Image: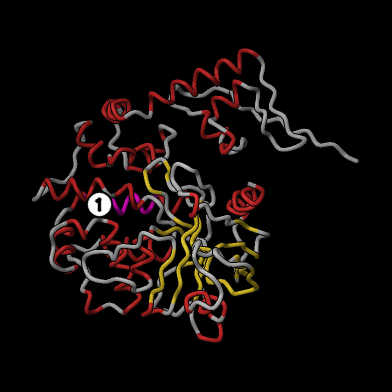
Amino acid sequence: KKSHLTVIDLIGQHRKEFRFEQRLRAIVDVRRGPVQRQVEREFPFLPAGCTIDLDRQSRELILENLKASVYRTRWAALVDDLKKDSDDLALDQFLGRYDLEPADIYKNKHSWTGLRRAAQKPAPASSAPDFEEELLNRLGGLHHIDDPERVSFYSKLLGQGQPPPLDHLDVRQQRLVTMLAWGLGSGKSGADSLVEFLTKAWGEEAVRAELRELLGVLSACSQHRPQPSSLDPSIPLSVHARYSRNEVVAALAYGEGVKPKATREGIFYAKPTRSDAFFIDLVKTEREYSPTTMYHDYAINRELFHWESQSQQRPGQPQVERYIHHREEGSNVLLFVRERKKNALGTAPFHFLGPVDYVSHEGERPVKFTWRLRTPMPGELFEVARSVAAA
């Protein structure tokens, strides 16, 4: 057998803004704990056959850099970096120069426009500062958009001086616009209609400009390749793209108008599009779930998924029978999966695993289903979904 030795220069000569954390996150399993702790413990969770050996000086240099990076991503430090920079940087340029991620900017309801103003850099003025602030605070909630269709469509609309004419758009495009409006908080804006909200929002030039920049950054750094689904063309969902719950509600026409329809449970049936949507948190904690909702949901392999119904459901009930006979009845069963409820920016989005097909079921209260994915699960998400099987 041949042995292979790979040497990676992690140290080299780097400017002070360089963040070792970003490089090390590509190597270590961050689900096993913070990068700094793994360096301190000499990388205990590497894949079999892999080692990272650091001499004392290198280890101290990296740990010093990791500790300093915590400060550098604080808001005051970001303002200071941008203020001292002589160049008028765009968002992607600032992130690249200071080795940052978009989440470093958008934590705690901050924004790129807010950062520019705090650093005394030019930014378009607002005609309604309180309304603009509400919009800017919500841009971090759009941080998950990674669907090329949405990136392209929204970027085109935002580049126009007038809001999109809803009556000139097809059904799919109207739902895409609703998804964007709900993401920007149209339901809490006091507007009586989407047209009213969009007209007001489009008047905030700084918001439109920043969102276009953010979409470009998100498109460039996306790690997934969303694919078209086999759903009706009016449903704007792409397999393996990420969506908030409200965006799914809009895409499936479960609600309409200026305000999203409340969906607090992990399932809902959208009658207009004949679709059952299942929202699944893979990692469940006793603090966030009651004993009756600690469902055991996991990947069997990249094409089969084990899912448990609500705790009081049993075969024979109309809802359960619809799940079992969805193909004969012409309805969809759609899986939306995320690792945990929260991420660095708040509520985490869901990965759309696409339409699935019934394979089998057993038991009751809850009923345990096996579903077959039409598109295999992405490798990284599969590792998480498989790891909870033995939990």
Residue 203 position in % (x across, y down): 14, 57
Residue 94 percent coordinates (x, y):
36, 37
Residue 29 placement, left or right of 218: right
Q: Is residue 261 above or below residue 298?
A: below
The magenta segment: 207-217
The image position of residue 338, as x and y in percent, is 49, 53
Q: Quadrant of the N terminus?
A: top right
Main SS of the magenta segment?
helix
Seen in the picture, residue 17 relative to 348 is either above or below; the reply is above
Whether residue 219 is situated above or below residue 80 in the rendered picture: below
* 116 left or right of 69 in image: left
Tell me residue 46's x, y (percent): 68, 34
In which image quadrant can residue 78 be found? top left
Q: Is residue 214 magenta?
A: yes
Question: Could you tell whether 163 is left or right of 175 in the image?
Answer: left
Q: Residue at x 56, y 62 (%)?
A: 308
- Which of the 4 image quarters holds residue 186? bottom left
Residue drawn at (57%, 15%) of the image: 60
The residue lying toward the viewer, choosing from 46 and 204, is: 46
Element class at badge 1: helix
Determine the residue located farthest toward the top in the rendered image: 57
Query: In the figure, is residue 342 to the left or right of 124?
Result: right
Task: Identify the residue position indicated by label 1 in the image.
Answer: 209
Task: Specify the amino acid type for callout 1.
Answer: Ala
Front residue of 282/55: it is 282
The quarter of the picture where residue 147 lies is: bottom left
Asked if residue 187 is among those painted magenta in the image, a careful observer would answer no
Other residues around mark 1 within 10 Å, as few (<14) / some (14–19) / many (≥20): some
Q: Residue furthest left?
A: 127
